[in-house]
Image: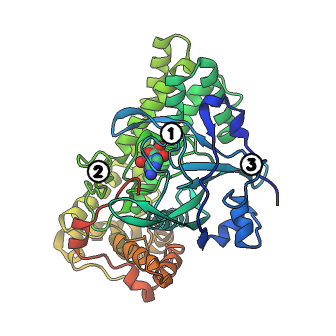
Amino acid sequence: MSTLEYTYLTLPNKFFELVKPAPLSKPEIALLNQKLMHELGINTSNSQELLKFLQLAEPNPNAQTFAQAYAGHQFGHFTMLGDGRAVMVGEWVQTEKNRYDIQLKGGGRTKYSRGGDGKATYKAMLREYLISEAMFHLNIASSRSLAVIKTGDTVQREQVFEGAVLPRVMKSHIRVGTFEFARQFCTLEEQQALLDYTIERLYPELKSTQNKALELLNTVMHAQIKLIANWMRVGFIHGVMNTDNMAISAETFDYGPCAFMNSYHPNTVFSSIDRDGRYAFRNQANIGKWNLTRLAEALLPMIHSEQSVAVEWAQETLAKYDRLWVNQYYGTMLLKLGIEDLSSELVTWVNELLSLMEKYTLDYTNTFLALSNPLFLAEPNMLQDDFVTWRNRWENYIESSVGMAHARTIMSKNNPAFIPRNHLVEEALDSMIAGDDSKFKTLMQVVENPYSYDPKNIAYSTPPLPEFDSRFKTYCGT
Ligand code: AMP
Ligand code: MG
């Protein structure tokens, strides 16, 4: 098995702290993602070897594990941050082109931990494992989860919980906040080193461009727009889109207070600390733009040496965001209706459908599923007059254009039948913690095949009673 590399450590040493993962009392691999291990070509023959590979067994003098420095805007306020409970194990080179960070979430304290204990609870890591893998299988760029390893130690939160570590895999953990850190605390030369490294690592096609900083901004903007439209496609609410949680690689990551929406309401929020709905379902595109504006500010000195010129150029790039978003979002929503064209009339139909879904508190996933899959029974409110009028007009349009069979093929790829529904996730996690892994394993199988509807799995597509959602809260830092 090849060894891990550490190209990140070629950056100026302000960007990281060399640190070892905290030793674990009694490590036990609770979940192992065999398929991902295989895909990456990580061949460990037993648990001990895997723990050794992850630097969680005997110390390896050659390992240069580290924590990354970064800053970021949390709920709109700038703060110095850094990996407070994550330790980078190293970079895994799958192929010449595919290099992945392997990072231990819950890996122990670092110099960026502030008051935190560097730990993570078993429940939160099980949740991240399940949801990140579900996102991947929904065809949405995401960090992956390699395993959940119980530590044998406890974690003190509002109660005492079991602790765990989650090795997560990502193209890179460089964030908008990494560039904010560079702008705030580093010299121009050091900022340039981060830019060059990021481009080499994630977007090598930009190496020969005239203005690399501006091109990076433009590229990340396109990729983030695509990502957020994809979240909207499946009803995903990230929950904590602080700039330190927005990856330059445009992979979804930092699964803390995220959740999936059941009945459609654009203002849906589950995060216990998001009282003003800053990160509500409908606000995700706006926040994407806000975060990219922070990235632009961080890149300014590298866009042009004269600030006024740099600002003007950055603004020109960001000015494209709204139009790009509208095209990407409605293009995506129309695919959910089996339509590959985009026109202002079709856009109106999407908005009308969403208004009807809001009016009748229809389940987001199941409404599209009922439109796309004749096996799936419509909710009674889909038989209301105004809904039927909408549906007839849509059906007539499809019949007179591409035909229903073709539309259904498109819809089946864009409308999941199964999302990890909050109540089922909670149930699966609670029983896993109580020692019964059957619910977790079955739910995992269902969310690994989100697009193939199987009536025998109807329980997994049934939303909870509305009371569940009105009480359901998600948390950061668990
Ligand atoms: P998050 O909301 O998960 O993005 O976390 C924000 C910052 O707090 C990150 O820098 C984390 O590394 C840090 N953090 C979260 N939980 C802990 C913890 N238990 N101990 C130390 N640092 C933490
Ligand atoms: Mg974070």
Q: Is mark 1 within 8 Å of ligand 1?
A: yes
User: Mark 2: which secondary structure?
Assistant: loop
- Measure how far apart labels 2 and 1 are at the Cα level: 22 Å
Q: Please, which residue is most extreme toward the right here? A: 1
Q: Amino acid at mark 2?
A: Ile
Q: Residue at x 39, y 52 (%)?
A: 330
User: Amino acid under label 3?
Assistant: Ala
CB of mark 2 near ligand 1 (< 8 Å):
no
Q: Secondary structure at mark 1?
A: loop
User: In 3D space, how far apart are the residues under numbered discs 3 and 2 (Cα atoms)?
Assistant: 38 Å
Reading the chain from its start, which is encountered first: label 3 or label 2? 3
Residue that extends furthest to the top in the rendered view of this protein = 306
Q: Residue at x 50, y 17 (%)?
A: 310
Looking at the image, which residue is at 48% across and 66% down?
122
Q: Is residue 415 left or right of residue 275?
A: right
The N terminus - image quarter: bottom right
Mark yes or no: residue 456 visible: yes
CB within 8 Å, label 3 to label 2: no
**In the drawing, does residue 279 fall left or right of residue 96?**
left
* x and y percentages locating residue 10 in the rendered image: 72, 33
Q: Earlier in the sequence, mark 2 or mark 1?
A: 1
Query: Which residue, given by chain and number where applicable, does mark 3 sit on?
Result: 63
Residue 46 falls left or right of residue 404:
right
Are the two marked residues, 3 and 1, in contact with CB atoms closer than 8 angstroms?
A: no
Q: Which mark is residue 273?
A: 2
Which disc number belongs to residue 112? 1
Q: Give the residue type that dot 1 points to.
A: Tyr
Q: Residue furthest bottom?
A: 456
- Residue 185, above or below 112: above
Which is in the foreground here, disc 2 or disc 1? 1
Q: From the viewer's side, name the closer residue of 111 and 104.
A: 111
